[in-house]
Amino acid sequence: MSQAKTADGALIELVDIRKVYQMGTTAVNALDGVSLRIERGDYVAIMGPSGSGKSTLMNIVGCLDTPTSGSYKLRGIEIRDRDDDELARIRNQEVGFIFQTFNLLSRADALHNVELPMIYAGRPKPFRRERAKEMLDLVGLGDRTHHRPNELSGGQRQRVAIARALVNEPSLVLADEPTGNLDSKTGLEIMALLDEVHRQGNTVVLVTHEEDIAANAERIVRLRDGKIESDQVTARVRRPANPSPEPAAPAPPAT
């Protein structure tokens, strides 16, 4: 399930990214010339106060939004050239999302919630079931496969979300305030699980406003007023375990 760090180009490369929102007659610069490079296997925290642009940056990196101008390349492919269908496919296959509010289907059990990205990817049902069970085992919920979200604790729901994020072996795991709805003890358990996800070689980008959560990363990028204020390597240096070959890059857009 891991993506190894390699020397043949960045996983994420943002160059002079700008995002302008029109609020009535006022233009709001949510991002103002952001350039950022993230290598395969990195563990990066993005921080900033409210209004700093970190959520906008997360949405662009996760292909949930597109920049007004500038270049965003994911594994060397220019994302701005993709249409909505292609962006949806990239989100499903290349990015594993972990949200503060879990975003689980309330009427579906844990197994079906984890299966969802594979359903969208067109995987056959026997494969989906086996893979979803494998991922739930991985996050310690092998005995909760048929429990619905309202039958799980907050920490267990987030574990289901992590299993779902990993199920398609994404290039990038993107976690938005993953402990925001959890108590301190459960939050520590979830961060330990994310640490293991990274240790297995996955690229993790963590969006948070909490210093102690950001301290789990190897690098902290701080935003203010839509610009990068600082970009520092932390003391936590790890190396991916059991690296696997890099998957094929997304196909170029049809001409």
Image (tube, helix red, strand yellow):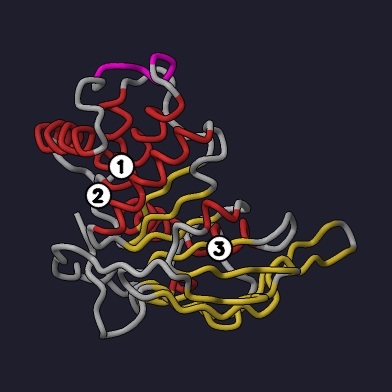
Counting residues from the N terminus, which is met first, the one under dot 3 or under dot 1?
3
Quarter of the picture containing the C terminus is: bottom left
Q: Quadrant of residue 25?
A: bottom right
* Alpha carbons under labels 2 and 3: distance apart: 24 Å
Badge 1 marks a residue whose secondary structure is helix
Which residue is depicted at the point 67% across and 63% down?
A: 53
Relative image position of residue 133 (x, y in whole percent) = 17, 31
* Whether label 3 touches label 1, CB < 8 Å: no
Counting residues from the N terminus, which is met first, the one under dot 2 or under dot 3?
3
* Residue 200 in the figure: left or right of residue 234: left
* Residue 8 in the figure: left or right of residue 187: left
Region rendered in magenta = 146-151
Kind of residue indicated by mark 2: Asn
Residue extending farthest to the top is 151
Q: Is residue 159 magenta?
A: no
Counting residues from the N terminus, which is met first, the one under dot 2 or under dot 1?
1
Which residue is tagged 3?
A: 46
* Alpha carbons under labels 3 and 1: distance apart: 25 Å
Quarter of the picture containing the N terminus is: bottom left
Q: Quadrant of residue 201?
A: bottom left
* Whether label 2 touches label 1, CB < 8 Å: yes
Circle nearer the viewer, 2 or 3: 3
Is residue 145 shown above or below 5? above
Number of the label disc, if any, that sits on residue 168: 2
Which residue is depicted at the point 30% across and 25% down?
A: 110
